[in-house]
Image (tube, rainbow, N blue to C red):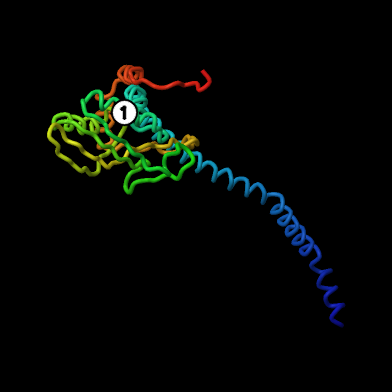
Amino acid sequence: MDKRTFILAIIKKYELLLASGLIIILLIILAINFMLPNFQRAKLIFSQKLTLQQRYEKLTHKDKALLEMDAKFLQETYPKISWILPEYKDFVSLFSAFDLLQEKTGVTILRTNFQFGTISTRSASLIRSFGIESFTVPLTIEVAGNMSQLQKFQEMVANLSGRLIILDNSQWTFKKNNIAVRFDGRAFFYPVSAEIGAIDSPLPSLSKEKEEILKKIAQNIHIESIEEDQKRISSGKSNLFQ
């Protein structure tokens, strides 16, 4: 018996078993082909479920944090923050602040000098001080007055009642009737992002130090006084053609 005849005899003898095996293998292949997309979809659904669960936990935590906040206090304080830390460099508000300081303290502001090149509100490069989130506007102020006036001037600059300014160093010149001082310092501004963060993004944390600053701002600044101060400052023409 040759080899071919032997193979045919084996197939004929076990044809039912082989046919059943082929059918089973074919069914398995077809099942895998049809069920594989469903397995992949089930895996995707499970992954999305985990993502949604994580987002829900973040939203729950954020909702709890928002409920614990004093919304009225923050709502009333935000305009005051914008007054001392504007969104742009806003040199007009700096001049206004110096005018008010001169009026309230009795000093004479001899000269103010801002660093040119960073004077543009939007187009110039932004300078961020090391360790400070806000951006800076380097400036120099020369004032004259007696000791009590100059002391009051420095206190008002630092008391968060007007535009935020830090005096880094000073040069004092003593004359007969008064004192001339040159202050080198920095004003600050904080650009607000035009993009709104994701709904499940975490809230910015407020340290105890920042909370104390907010309370100080809320106590020292009154919206009514801001409006009154702005009205008291004389300005030039707003329309060049009139």
Residue 172 against residue 230 in the figure, above or below: below
Tag count: 1
Residue that sits furthest to the front in the current view: 176
The x and y percentages for residue 125 are 45, 45
The x and y percentages for residue 204 are 37, 37
Residue depicted at x 45% and y 36%? 121
Residue 182 visible, this angle: yes
The x and y percentages for residue 107 are 21, 29
Residue 1 visible, this angle: no
- Front in this rendered view, residue 211 or 38: 211
The x and y percentages for residue 111 are 30, 35
| Residue wearing tag 1 | 97
Alpha-carbon neighbours of circle 1 within 10 Å: few (<14), some, or many (≥20)?
many
- Front in this rendered view, residue 149 or 211: 149
Residue depicted at x 39% and y 29%? 92
Residue 113 against residue 7 in the figure, above or below: above
